[in-house]
Image (tube, helix red, strand yellow):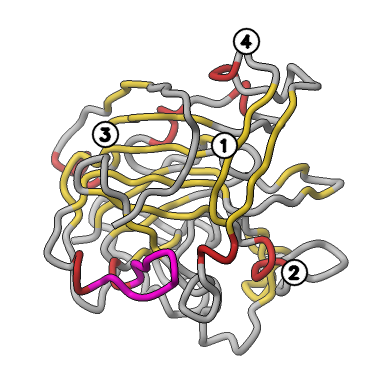
Amino acid sequence: MFSLLLFLSCYGDPSYVSGGADALRFAGQVIAYKPAPGQYTGLSAGSKALGAPDGSIVTLGDFGGSITLRMSSSITDRAEEADFVIWGNAFYIGGDPRSRWAEPGLVEVSPDNVNWYLIGGSLFNAGNRPAANLLIVTYSNTNNFIWPPWLNGYSSHSVTNYSLNSVFTQQLRNRDSAYTNSTSDNVETLYGFADCTPKGEVGEDWVADDPLQFGIETSGGDPIMLEWAVDSSGNSIYSAISNLSFRYIRITTAVQQASSRLGERSTEIDAVGICQ
């Protein structure tokens, strides 16, 4: 068990969703919304991540910005299948699934909002240890427009978190910073993180795509498997957590990179849904 070092201050947006049985599949409460500085953080609200995906997104800002959500029902392990899905606003460039604008966010799960477990996905494993990619960033308030409201009254803010900078940027195309699939159209190389795959069709009886299948099959988004949970050394901890039930999801912007056209790479979240 381990916890990531995130923000020291505490901020909550105790918002809830209401509705029928379908609402029980989605996030129902914002426990904490603590975005890093970013071009849209002053215009965003954590409650936009609640309920079913509807195109209304919450931005987490630059590296280290995070949101913690409480699911309306518990997430339990479904062996060899996706356990939950995160939808953001990633998109294919020119409609080509081999080239996409992705803004990856780290995903953590917790049964109690105390003990947190990191999803390693395709980029964090024993060969690329999370602990070897710790990054400390200090932000100074030089522009009130991008300074998040929860930090009003503070002139600076520091965050320590695991970074995907080195491994993620190796796959970026120079001319437009698009993430390119490194193998074939049939093998997904970017999985286990939020805001990496575009949204598909999400009806009332949606089912998750195959997490390792390249492209969108039905509901799109980023299907997450508890099998990918790792410790800080990148070793699997699945056997230790497979019998737990998880009610909390924390998503954190994991790259620090800016585009002259689109601004900072900021993880955006539309919704989180439980597979069944």
Q: Residues within 10 Å of mark 1 (few under 14, many from 20)?
A: many
Q: Residue beneath label 4, please?
A: 153
Question: Which segment did they paint magenta?
Answer: 228-238
Under circle 4, the secondary element is loop
- Label 3 and label 4: CA atoms lie apart by 30 Å
What residue do we see at 52% from left, 35% from top? Answer: 58
Which quarter of the picture shows residue 114? top left
Of callouts 3 and 4, the N-terminal one: 3
Instruction: Note whether 23 is above or below 223 in the view shown.
Output: above
Of callouts 3 and 2, the N-terminal one: 3
- Label 3 and label 1: CA atoms lie apart by 18 Å
Of callouts 1 and 4, the N-terminal one: 1
Badge 1 amino acid: Thr
- Label 1 and label 4: CA atoms lie apart by 21 Å
- Label 2 and label 1: CA atoms lie apart by 22 Å
Where is residue 241 drawn, in percent x and y?
20, 64
Badge 2 amino acid: Leu
- Label 4 and label 2: CA atoms lie apart by 37 Å
Under circle 2, the secondary element is loop
> In which quadrant will I find the C terminus?
bottom left
Badge 3 amino acid: Gly
Query: In front: mark 3 or mark 2?
Result: 2
Q: Residue beneath label 2, please?
A: 172
In this rendering, would 116 be left or right of 39? left
Q: Are marks 3 and 4 in contact (CB under 8 Å)?
A: no
Instruction: Note whether 171 is above or below 139 in the view shown.
Output: below
Q: Residue beneath label 3, please?
A: 28
Under circle 3, the secondary element is strand
Q: Residue beneath label 1, please?
A: 59
In this rendering, would 94 be left or right of 82? right
> Of 220 and 105, which appears nearest the observer?
105
> In which quadrant will I find the N terminus?
bottom left
